Image (cartoon, rainbow, N blue to C red):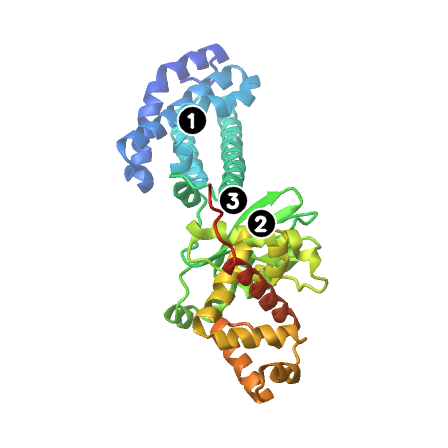
Amino acid sequence: MAPNRTKAETLAWLRTISGELSTATLKRLEDTLPWYGDMPPSRRSAVGLVAQAGITSFIAWFDDPRSTPWIAADVFGAAPRELLRSVSLQQTLQLIRVTVEVVEERVKDGGETLREAILLYSREIAFAAADVYARAAEARGLWDARLEALVVDSILSGEYDEELPSRIAALGWHGHGEVAVLVGTTPKTLDVDQVRRAARHMAADVLIGVQGSRLVLVVGRADPRSRDADEQIGTSAALSFMEIAVALEPHFGPGHLVLGHEVPNLVDASKSARAALAGFAVARSWRHAPRPVHADDLLPERALAGDPLARATLVHRIYRPLQAHSTELLTTLWCYLDNGRSLEATARELFVHPNTVRYRLKRVSEVIGWDATGAREALILQAALIIGSMSDHETPVRRS
């Protein structure tokens, strides 16, 4: 084409060869981009539509450069939405480069004005592509945040449905082992990415939920805990949930931080969540509660507040095991606590030697895991004995 043609003649010529440019572009894509040839036919067709739309949009833009804001809609609107998820930004830029090269080669004799227009348009289309991908990433981030909040709410409420596993999988949850729920206050500035990085550093994953002033983390191990895994991965795999909670503590706001008990998997996370939430509600009643604190260390306060899970835990983990193991141990513990944890006073009441009391208390600790000689654990044990004895005398009301 002669370089001294008018703009109208150039436009007419470009429209004439647009089909030829599209065909040449698709051929060049298949010859130079391996990922294009590996695509299924439907996706190759979609990529081809994008290339053809780019050429058509260039011709329209050459006619009216003020149409620049519509470039992204004109070009990328021709492709199905799922193409953004299957074609990376890098691959899209490669597609733009190949298309521009083909057009430049074909219209190299079209004059300086046309060549400058191609360069300017390629710059605009590259920026438009980056904008499309940035908006898609932002939308995906907002969607992920809403989906994560929905999943955490389902765990806290214990309302599971058939879609919950797929929602969790969509979030990229890597937890496959035990789970525990951590509840604290929301900081003024919450950096969720930093929280996730801290969890990954400890071979764990987190689901994050913000409920007003409360920050809830569902913490899961990336792999099931085992000795073999500990040996292969290192010491990080052996971290307890309390150690993980201590490491995550700086990411919470001021106030109490409560860790629910460990459960086998995410399906049972609502049990840990109930314990953590109940503990968080009454943690202020323990003046010197550590941060973080186990929800089970707040069993007396939770039971007094009417938490049925705490009452059941006290009965089934302390009172019933002692009752089933030995009434002698149960009686000794009662006497010891009633006598202000005095070995001598307990021995006098039971007509035994203080060393016998000391031995029985040791056996109590071995049976249930709590040590009656500590002030805090003594309070837990006394609450268990009181609630347990009340449950012994609870009889169903007869209907007349």
Q: Residues within 10 Å of mark 2 (few under 14, many from 20)?
A: many
Mark 1, secondary structure of its residue: loop
- Tell me the tag on residue 152: 3
102 left or right of 388 in image: left
Q: Quadrant of the rendered structure where residue 256 is? A: bottom right
The Cα–Cα distance between marks 1 and 2, rounded to whole angstroms, is 62 Å
Residue at (52%, 58%) from the top-left corner?
393
Q: Secondary structure at mark 2?
A: strand
The image shows residue 106, relative to residue 258, as above or below, that is above
Q: Is residue 105 above or below residue 166?
A: above
* Mark 1 in CB contact with mark 2 (< 8 angstroms): no
For the residues marked 1 and 3, what is the alpha-carbon distance in whole angstroms?
59 Å
Residue farthest to the left, as pictured: 41
Disc 1 versus disc 3: nearer the observer: 3
Question: Who is closer to the viewer here, 364 or 274?
Answer: 364
Mark 1, residue position: 108
Q: Kindly tell me whether residue 247 is visible in this rendering.
A: no
Q: Residue 190 at what x, y percent from top left? A: 64, 48
Residue type at mark 1 is Lys
Instruction: Please determine whether, in this image, residue 68 is positioned above or below residue 259.
Output: above
Residue 103 pos. (x, y %): 40, 27
In this view of the protein, can residue 275 be seen by the observer?
yes
- Report the disc number at residue 28: none
Q: In the figure, residue 37 lies in which quadrant? A: top left
Instruction: Residue under label 2, please give it.
Output: 216
Looking at the picture, which amino acid does disc 2 mark?
Val
